[in-house]
Image (cartoon, rainbow, N blue to C red):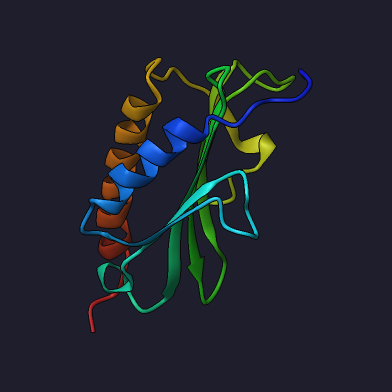
Amino acid sequence: MGGEKTLNETLLRIVAERLGSLSIVDTVRVFPYEKPDAVVAEFVADYYPEDVRRVELECRVYTNGDFSITYREVRSSTDWMARWDRHANPHNNRDHYHEPPRARTDDAVDASYPDDVLEVVSVVLSDVDDRLGDVWDDTPAE
């Protein structure tokens, strides 16, 4: 749906600065070789249980207001993912959320996000904070 989208590099750099200022974020890569259309933030491993090997937040933002933000926990068993999207598509409203743990197209539900992508990032970070609490609540005590 739709042809070419233009990456909003300026806004993505602002998102990268915002993510880089957070204590939970270890590194932020802006347009890395393997994902040249994204900002990828890797979280500090110590915030998560041992079963979680890596946690990253991947952000793509376009000049037409579309975006895709994916949160991924790489685990020793099955990965856990959620995705916040704004784009035209045949499966849901333009604003939609791909529910965990797989964040597949079939897992999408309609959503409503703020117009400002930086506000959307705040919503996502709040959801990530809630998820962090759930991860520890679900981790057996040693």
Is residue 100 something one can see in this rendering? Answer: no
Q: Residue lying farthest front?
A: 10
Which residue lies most toward the bottom here?
Answer: 142
Q: Which of 39 and 123 is in front in this view?
A: 39
- Return the x and y of residue 44 as percentages of the image width and height: 31, 67
Residue at point 41%, 20% (across, down): 113
72 relative position to 64: left or right? left
Quarter of the picture holding the C terminus: bottom left
Residue 47 horizontal/vertical position (percent)? 26, 67
Q: Residue at x 45, y 69 (%)?
A: 54
As rendered, which of 110 and 26 lies closer to the eye? 26
Regarding residue 136, the answer to whether it shows in the image is yes
Q: Which of the 4 quarters of the picture holds residue 108?
A: top right
Asked which quadrant contains residue 125, the reply is top left
In front of the other: 130 or 89:
89
Is residue 28 shown above or below 111? below
In the image, residue 89 sits, relative to residue 136, either above or below, namely above
Q: Is residue 23 left or right of residue 9?
A: left
Q: Position of residue 4 (x, y in %)?
A: 75, 25
- Report the front residue among 34 and 108: 34
Tell me which residue sits at (33%, 72%) in the image. Answer: 45
Q: In this view, does 121 lie above or below 38?
A: above
Examine the rendered structure and indicate whether residue 116 appears above or below residue 98. Answer: above
Which quadrant of the rendered structure holds the N terminus? top right
